[in-house]
Image (cartoon, rainbow, N blue to C red):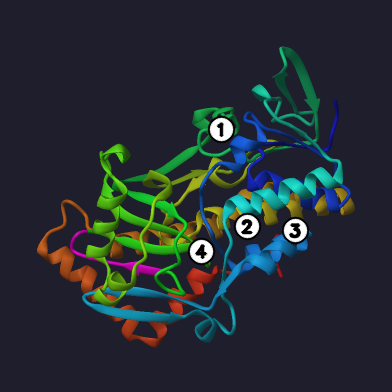
Amino acid sequence: MKTQVAIIGAGPSGLLLGQLLHNAGISNVILERQGPDYVLGRIRAGVLEQGMVELLREAGVGQRMDAEGLPHAGFELAFDGRREHIDLKGLTGGQGVMIYGQTEVTRDLMAARADSGATTVYHAENVRPHDMKTGQPYVTYEKDGQQHRLDCDYIAGCDGYHGVARQSIPSEALQVFERVYPFGWLGILADTPPVSDELVYARHERGFALCSMRSPTRTRYYVQVPAEEKVEDWSDERFWEELKSRLPDELAERLVTGPSIEKSIAPLRSFVVEPMQYGRLFLVGDAAHIVPPTGAKGLNLAASDVSTLYNILRKVYAEGRTDLLERYSAICLRRIWKAERFSWWMTSMLHRFPDSDAFSQRIQHTELDYFVGSEAGRRTLAENYVGLPYEPIEDA
């Protein structure tokens, strides 16, 4: 089999890249180790930046998002008994975010790909990219006990942190930057009405908490827990009581509880590899970088990587601009490191660190107090939260 772009991974980044390329007349095949039901079963992010919303519309998959998604014009910071509203639209000239679950984004992209007739190979085992440093790369995989070869011009590694794409690059060719945090997020999904119309980020002496939602009837709540905590030790009742203890009284009093649909603990880490390309293999999304979920940047960073790679490949095939290929990593990393900084900052300011002394706690308090008390500080928060502009692929 031969195609122009081989995409490893059928998560939202791989599917979005595939849809954009297909619409531009660039052939592509997606290889996915798991089945479609498994991919759809991943419970992940739900806050979409303005740039990702526009990219989904450009790909022709924004109809259900626009009909069912929840546009948000702000969010709240709760700390020291205060509730501070950050007016995203007012501070950024009209930009906001969209609450629309990653599962639904993936579902929409899967449906669009099925309608397009483009090829997705599920249950592709032992996927391996080859000859990435040559002009004729290819990918091998096994399916139903048979060995297959996919010849291509370029390979996009959209297969996540644990995927084969990054592991196929010699370790000496990559520089790794990483910080592992000493806590995780215990999250539950429940069919209960949201406690607030907007997301609430709460800093409390017992630890961080987040009130989020997927729809007007489905909520997603999180509390900070030690890294070694076990999800089986947390009953629904224990979770709800802990969440209430970390929220301002007026929110805790109106919190509607109910049985959890899903419950899990997500570790927190910051991770970046440089460069994000090796010959004709390009790393996209979690394959190249991880951010703590505090800033809601993970899925959104993957989307900006997709936008960059798509626009470069479009120029390559339409105009022969192969010179742009070598710019992919540098273009992506400029935006990635800014998002890493914001996610690190939000994490550092809102969580309780086990080794935090009295000085550090005062600094946390003062940092938040300064940012919410300053017009410039609020604007900085807002412009980072809605998402910085996508980097241009060519110099102006």
Q: Looking at the image, is 374 positioned above or below residue 318? A: below
Label 1 or label 2, whichever comes before in sequence order: 1
Q: Which residue is mark 1?
A: 163
SS for callout 4: loop
Q: Tell me which amino acid carries mark 1.
A: Gly
Q: Position of residue 217 (x, y in %)?
A: 51, 64
Q: Which residue is mark 2?
A: 304
Q: Residue at x 44, y 67 (%)?
A: 194
Q: Quick check: marks 4 and 2 in contact, CB under 8 Å?
A: no
Task: Name the disc covering residue 217, or none.
Answer: 4
SS for callout 2: helix
Q: Which residue is mark 3?
A: 61
Q: Tell me which amino acid carries mark 3.
A: Val
Marks 4 and 1, how far apart at CA: 34 Å
Q: Quick check: marks 1 and 3 in contact, CB under 8 Å?
A: no
Residue 219 falls left or right of residue 284 = left
